[in-house]
Image (tube, rainbow, N blue to C red):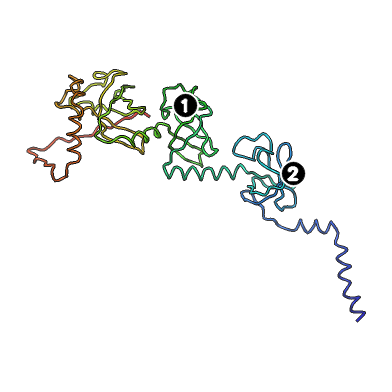
Amino acid sequence: MVNRSKHATKPAATNVGFTHDDFAALLDSYDYHFSPGDIVAGTVFSLEPRGALIDIGAKTAAFIPIQEMSINRVDQPEEVLNNNEVREFFILADENEEGQLTLSIRRIEYMRAWERVRQLQQEDATVRSLIFATNRGGALVRIEGLRGFIPGSHISTRKVKEELVGEELPLKFLEVDEERNRLVLSHRRALVERKMNKLEVGEVVVGVVRGIKPYGAFIDIGGVSGLLHISEISHEHIETPHNVFNVNDEVKVMIIDLDAERGRISLSTKQLEAEPGDMVRDPQLVYAKAEEMAAKYREQMNAPAEALVIPPATEEPEAVVDEPVAVEV
């Protein structure tokens, strides 16, 4: 019995001889499987002037630089992290020469922000954001922390761009492309959509001519722009819209199409003519009879298909080629 007891104590004596070097060697032999791109849980245990040390269970404390602490600007680590706080971290870079991993919170926020804006685009949501800067091409905003761009042609305001800094605008998504880091938005589309909810095809509205192009006139109707294409000015051929309109003219037009997806409103005065060419000869006569002619247009538009009798052709009609509609973007 006694001999057995002494023999049993020998392994315990061996355990006492397990040194710190042996323990370090055991740690070195252990594979933690930490790789760049992994998301791991970590505990903040030391805030440094330009970053923080994080315990993620590795041999050496990982480090998160201050510029990787948020998708937004951070001046001091205390703005984002607290000692003993546990949270998720993205492994940004492999171990350096000291065996230390580099972490990021910014990358996690970045990935989730793109996921969120893709969802908002799919929902065709309207978002609001402050303009924080402008340049020659347009204005810059932040959506979910991501930098977004509004092209100048999609800003519907009479203010000069420099005066827009600090102003909050409703916006719709035009392009969401994470791979190319492109987030493009439209103020014009948001306004048109809101205006469209109050407009109907066949409705007569009063507007002001804000611009004239070879292909038509742009009419401001309550803060949004609609296109009166040259082919919709009159049944009579017109060489140029300048022959009929001047900038700042007040006009009556009828809405013939509302395209919310592209943010476009198509207008017509041709459909308001009692006689072909009235818009060229006497626009005021057209405006005076606008509601009467629009009512007839709506009746025809809403008439059952069987009520529309098409007389048989007496001769082969000439081929008609639709003229492409150019719009200002």
Number of callouts in the render? 2
Q: Secondary structure at mark 2?
A: strand
Between 14 and 86, the one nearer to me in the picture: 86
How busy is the neighbourhood of tag 2: few (under 14 within 10 Å), some, or many (20 plus)?
some
Name the spot of residue 296 as percent of width and height, x first. 17, 34
Q: Which mark is residue 137?
A: 1
Q: Residue at x 83, y 59 (%)?
A: 22
The quarter in which the C terminus is drawn is top left
Q: Residue at x 44, y 42 (%)?
A: 121
Name the residue at the bottom extreme: 1
- Whether tag 1 and tag 2 are in contact, CB under 8 A, the answer is no
Name the spot of residue 50 as percent of width and height, x first. 71, 37
Q: The disc labelled 1 sits on which kind of residue?
A: Gly
User: Which mark lies nearer to you, 1 or 2?
Assistant: 2
Q: Which mark is residue 46?
A: 2
Mark 1 → mark 2, Cα distance in angstroms: 44 Å
Q: Residue at x 40, y 34 (%)?
A: 190
Name the residue at the left extreme: 314
Compared with residue 325, is residue 282 higher up or lower down, i.e. above or below? Answer: above
In the figure, is residue 172 to the left or right of 83? left
The quarter in which the N terminus is drawn is bottom right
Between 96 and 200, the one nearer to me in the picture: 200
Name the spot of residue 15 as percent of width and height, x first. 85, 65
Name the spot of residue 293 as percent of width and height, x first. 18, 30
Q: Residue at x 19, y 28 (%)?
A: 272
Determine the image quadrant of residue 249.
Answer: top left
Please report whichever mark, 1 or 2, sits nearer to the chain's N-terminal start.
Answer: 2
Q: The disc labelled 2 sits on which kind of residue?
A: Ser
Q: Secondary structure at mark 1?
A: loop
In the figure, is residue 216 to the left or right of 5? left
Determine the image quadrant of residue 216.
Answer: top left
Q: Which mark is residue 98?
A: none
